[in-house]
Structure formats: C-alpha cells, structure tokens
Image (spheres, helix red, strand yellow):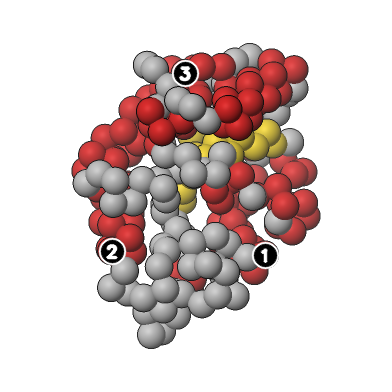
Amino acid sequence: MGIPPERANDDRWKDLHAHFVSEARDKEADVLIIGDDHVALLEQSNIYRDRLAALHCLVFGVMGDTVKAADWRVTNGEMERIPAKVVLLSIGHNDALLSSPDEFLTHLCSLVDNVYSRLPQASIFVMKLIPSGRRADSPARHWIGKVNEEMETRLRSKASVIDIDTSIINSEGLIDRHLLFDFFHLTQEGYSLVFDNVHLALHEALNQ
C-alpha cells in the first residue's frame, strides 16, 4: 500500500509518522489511540490529563487524516512492538463527503482487520463519528449520521463501538460553539462530554 496521494508531498505528515513509529518501538503502553483531528488534540484536553493519561496511553493522532491514511500508518510501523491491551480508533471525520458512507465503512472494516492482525489479543474499540456542522441540514452531518447508523452492524464481531453523547446536539438540532468551537473541533467542554464514555469503556476493558 503506497502513501495516500494527499500525503505524498507532506513532509510534516511523514515526520510525524516517523515520530510515532519511534515511540511505538521505544515505549510501552496499555492503550493505543489512533485517529484524526480529535485524537491529535486529545493530549491537550483536561480529560486526558485528569483521567485518560493514567491508563498508560500512546496517542497517535494526525490533523486532517483519513481512514486510508490511518490504515497506511498502522501498516507501516505505528503498531510495531506495542503490547497494548486496548486499541481505540477515532477516524472518519475528514472522510465526510469524500466517499459514500458504505465505501467509508468498508475502509474502516479493513483498518480494524489490520489492527487485529497485529494485536489479536487486544480489545478493539471504535468511536462513532462526532457530528459536525452547526445545522441539522449540514451535508457532513447527514453523512456522519448515515455512517453512525451502520457502524455497529458493519463492525459486529470485529470491534466494540462507543456511542457519542447525544447532548452534543441541542434540542433545536444545532451544535453550539462551547462544545465544537468551529463546529468541527472539540473544546475542553466538548472533550469532557465526548470522552467520558471513552474513559469508562477503556477502564473497564483494562480491568476485566
């Protein structure tokens, strides 16, 4: 599998990938978190510092990444020699409208299979996609809704799916800036709301 075309000339992305590969070789972790923008910014959140960090995590998130880019990163060293007990994937927000929901879910299943082939004993979790776009009629919101509706069915027997707290959308069907400051990226309050369920799921998996 070659480097995704959108990353072929992106030296920053290649350098970040090389850094993650080095961390995978040199560090130990009980939890490995791989994903896109929400994962890239996760370590700056209060909920990560206060609760998730204690689970002994490695966090490999890249702004702008797609599911194909994440799959390439997994194939090319980011899971090398990591004896993680739990793997969490949060990917797909940058795939919105680039393909059909069905095509995206097919690629997501391939990514999960790729992870499983490298850590067959690990518990694998996949987060549902966080809604984006302020209004209910946002094309991206509609695409994400379709993906989330089908995700559990498509990933059945492959991974556990973590729901997104529905209160991220208010009673009028809108997303507020105090949760997603640009209607895409999470604020501190948004991280606390969304990743509370994540912490509970990971903590339970580690203590089984």
Which x, y percent locates residue 56? Answer: 73, 36
Image depth: mark 2 or mark 1 in front: 2
Which x, y percent locates residue 95? Answer: 36, 46
Mark 1 falls on what kind of element?
Answer: helix
Seen in the picture, residue 81 relative to 158 is either above or below; the reply is: above
Foreground pick, 3 / 56: 3
Residue 198 appears left or right of 138: right
Which x, y percent locates residue 117? Answer: 43, 17
In the picture, the disc for residue 139 is 2
Lower sequence index among marks 3 and 1: 3
Seen in the picture, residue 193 relative to 72 is either above or below; the reply is: below
Q: Give the alpha-carbon distance from disc 2 to disc 1, as whole Å.
A: 25 Å
Residue 152 appears left or right of 30: left
Seen in the picture, residue 98 relative to 176 is either above or below; the reply is: above
- What amino acid is found at the position of numbered circle 1 in the picture? Gln
Query: Which of the 4 image quarters holds residue 2?
Result: top left
Residue under numbered circle 1: 188
Residue under numbered circle 3: 75
Foreground pick, 68 / 161: 68
| Label 1 packing within 10 angstroms: few (<14), some (14-19), many (20+) | some
